Amino acid sequence: MRVIGIDTASATASVALVENGLLLSERIDLRCESTSNAIRRSSKNNHAETILPLIELLFESTGLSLQDITGFALSIGPGSFTGLRIGLSTVKGLVYGSQIPVVGMSTLFAHAARVTDDDGLICALLDARKNEVYAAVFRKTGDVINRVTEDTVASAANVIATVREFQRGAPCLFVGDGAAVYKDLLLDSPGVRLLETIDYPTVAACVARLAEDRFRANRVDDLATLTPVYIRPSEAEFNRGSSLQLADNTRVNLR
């Protein structure tokens, strides 16, 4: 099984090719000159200009083509509204007229799944602007990651307060660009740790790995009706404030 993962919901776009859980290749859109692993990001920071070249680099590096791919997995949100639309339209263009299946995965789940060497609570935090973050809490034990809360949008302070309810004296690792934006606020809270290393796999690689079980079970999405998950609340909901909703013990084996 060969799955291409795509993430355009995050600040840094990435693509990856995973075969039966093994990462074959990944490419990242960086603000730097062209290298074997990245291409120069446009001055407008537009994923639309870079995502297809990244996929082409992926095929070149592996010697594979579209006909060799089992399926596409993409981060379906929450995240950048424009980025989400770019990712979905790109996949639709690539698989149009073919029988290649597609799976949409939570961007926050994929960020949490990047943590490969740490157990315990993980809070995936993405900057949603407007003084808000997209957030979800997970618990990792060995190769298994369980969803603790649903994806939501809220103030960083609200998320921190909710995370404390699950900590029970244990630390919580915060990941994602929201952790960098709200670093000072997070570090003022007890038991908070921030992701320091850059050696973890890309979001796209985790999207592909998380999707493999769904491809095996034929739990794929209907591309015609697949839409981005924005989750930003209405203005009335925003004024009331948001909190993290408990999940239904969703479990994913990361192997």
Image (cartoon, rainbow, N blue to C red):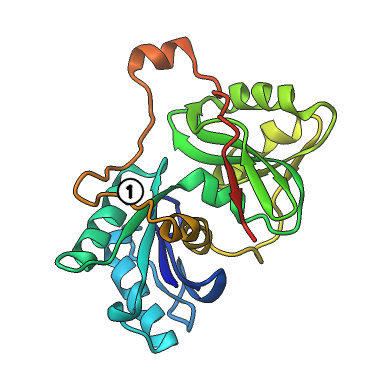
**Residue on which disc 1 sits:** 84
Task: Specify the farthest residue to the right.
Answer: 169
Picture quadrant of residue 21: bottom right
Provide residue 150's location: percent of width, then percent of height: 52, 31
Toward the viewer: 1 or 145?
1
Q: Considering the numbered disc 1 on the image, is that residue within a helix, a strand or a loop?
A: helix
- Is residue 182 or residue 145 the one in the foreground? 145
Label 1 is placed on what type of residue? Leu
- Quadrant containing the C terminus is bottom right
Q: Is residue 50 visible?
A: no
Q: Please, is residue 227 above or below residue 116 in the view?
A: above
Say whether residue 252 is left or right of residue 242.
right
**Residue drawn at the location 45% of the way across and 51% of the way down:** 10
- Name which residue lies at 74% across and 36% down: 187
Taking the view exactly as shown, the residue that stands out farthest to the front is: 217
Residue 36 picture location, percent across and down: 48, 84
Q: Nearer the viewer, residue 23 or 178?
A: 23
Quarter of the rendering containing residue 147: top right
Q: Quadrant of the N terminus?
A: bottom left
